Image (tube, rainbow, N blue to C red):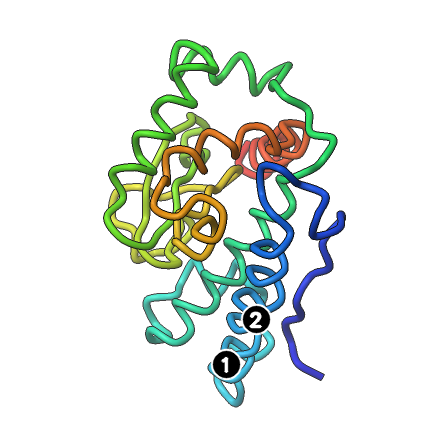
Amino acid sequence: MNKFQLPKLPYDYAALEPYFDQQTMHIHHQRHHQAYVDNLNKAILGTEVEEAELVDILKAVSKYGYAVRNNAGGHYNHTLFWQTLSPNAKKKPTGRLADEINAAFGSLDELKTKLKEAGLMQFGSGWVWLYVKYNGGLNIAATANQDNPLMDTQIVNRGYPILGIDVWEHAYYLKYQNRRADYLDAFWSVLDWSVVENNYESVITQIS
């Protein structure tokens, strides 16, 4: 049996309409994410990381070549992405995460503005992240392709992702065409802040 498996979505493909359309969700999950899983399993077969956990692979991914880097990143990034989306999303963060967002960025609206700016400035394919730095603070980063802040290939923006926005064209082009800004605006209607809060608390517990 393959080490890594495509995770099931906790909602139907049409559940995020009208913000994320059914066809895009189906293709994105069943074809794109499945390909990352299949290619990752092939890339690690017979290697020293065949039994390693995904996060551990990412933290030392510079040792394992581009096939592992691209596909391990693709699997991790998409898994986090699906988990943070919901048709019944909590619209605003509360508690400690809300306080940290206000401290780091001034307000939730300012955080959204900065994430959108990062998404629009990312040339070509990639991701935009809200992540926890090693010192516990929050930061924003954009990464190319399927890279993320966990990877040791990231020289500056290292840490623990708690929210990621896919800005590859396959994530939005069927519905939004070249209007990446509209897609980034729509994202907030399906982002479930309760999941992001849980991700944040898990990271803080881990590093404290």
Identify which amino acid the numbered label 2 is placed on: Ala
Q: Place residue 188 in its image quadrant.
A: top right
Which mark is nearer the camera, 1 or 2? 1
Foreground residue among 29 and 4: 29
Q: Are marks 1 and 2 in contact (CB under 8 Å)?
A: yes
Side of 96 relative to 111 (left or right):
right
Q: Quadrant of the C terminus?
A: top right
Residue drawn at point x = 53 percent, y = 12 percent: 99
State the residue position of label 2. 52
Up-down relation of residue 136 to residue 148 (above or below): above
Residue 107, position as x, y percentages in the image: 44, 11
Side of 129 relative to 200 (left or right):
left
Q: Place residue 7 in its image quadrant.
A: bottom right
Q: Judge the density around disc 1: few (<14), some (14-19), many (≥20) Cα neighbours within 10 Å.
A: some
State the residue position of label 1. 44
Residue 204, position as x, y percentages in the image: 56, 31
